[in-house]
Image (tube, grey):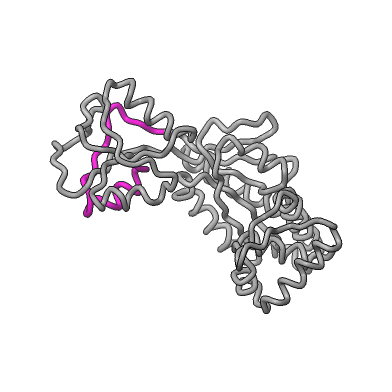
Amino acid sequence: MELRQIEYFLAVVEHRGIGGAASALGVAQPTVSQALRALERELGVQLFHRIGRGMVLSSAGRTMVGPSRQIVRDVGAAEDLLAVSDDVLTGRLDILAFPPTAMGPIVDLVGAFRRANPSVNVRFGELRDEDQAPSVIEDGHCEFVVAHLPIAGDDLDVVVLGEQEYWLVYPPGTDLPDGPVPLAELPRIPMVFVPRGQSVADEIEEAIRSAGARPPLAVLSEHREERLAMVLAGIGGTLLERSIAESAADRAVVRPVEPRFARPFGIAFDEAALSPVGRAFVTLVREYARDRAV
């Protein structure tokens, strides 16, 4: 097994196909295809199901993703130790973020880290389920997870990054008084919600029910990023992260809620298992947290 084969495998996973992987790697598509088939022959397993022109991970392929990313990080750490200049940090920073937390502080931190360490590559992926935070770190899928608190995992260190407040967003032209809207007095306007089973969505729905409000349901959307578009299209209202809600204030009716609904979020990692890149990033994260606390 060659490192190049592992890198090609991960590129296909991350770019969801051979075409995107080849473009990202700067090689021809047959080169990627041949490397993948050679890797499958060597391992004796099928890593992808090839459906038409699409590529879907097999169960063996899914099992291999975490260890492969760990190998790439380990090689990066070794290269860093052998770097000619002690001032040059090389390697890879792997972060998975729950979509509502993938903005603000973590983006600023990644930007600052890249400016200080331009030789470090960053993979900023999506964490679909906050309950999976400990396992994705333990299985090698990433070094860092950004999610709402509390983040489970007895062996994980957690640094608080901030707090996320949720505001109401209604279609243009909705008649609402100025100021915060009491949850108990939500208007009988259809709502766009995320299905239950996702922690923040569950808490929002429970808070509305506890307040005695029963707004009609318009849409249950698995895709969080589509909710604002649905609101702007007049389908119904929703609750969105304050930064997203305020960015749409010129196109929608935006109001805070009362009582205020907010959730803290942070970044989790296993300090004992961090690569040199990971340790450097933790230093920056902790400096940010200390400055924020002053």
Q: Is residue 270 left or right of residue 37?
A: left
Q: Residue 110: x percent and y percent?
A: 55, 55
Q: What residue appears at the point 56 percent right and 45 percent down from the top-left corner?
A: 127
Q: Quadrant of residue 188?
A: top left
Q: What residue appears at the point 70 percent right and 53 percent down from the top-left corner?
A: 58
Q: Residue 25: x percent and y percent?
A: 66, 72
Membership of 264 in magenta stretch: no
Comparing 268 with 134, the one in front is 134
Q: Residue 242: x percent and y percent?
A: 34, 43
Q: Is residue 123 left or right of residue 257?
A: right
Comparing 267 with 89, the one in front is 267
- Name the image quarter holding the N terminus: bottom right
Comparing 19 with 242, the one in front is 19
Q: Residue 243: x percent and y percent?
A: 35, 47
| Outermost bottom residue | 28
16 in relation to 181, above or below = below
79 in relation to 206, above or below = below
Give the extent of the magenta segment.
Answer: 240-262
Comparing 110 with 139, the one in front is 139
Q: What residue appears at the point 23 percent right and 30 percent down from the top-left corner?
A: 186
Q: What residue appears at the point 38 percent right and 51 percent down from the top-left corner?
A: 226
Image mark count:
0
Q: Is residue 114 left or right of residue 262?
A: right
Membership of 241 in magenta stretch: yes
206 in relation to 52, above or below = above
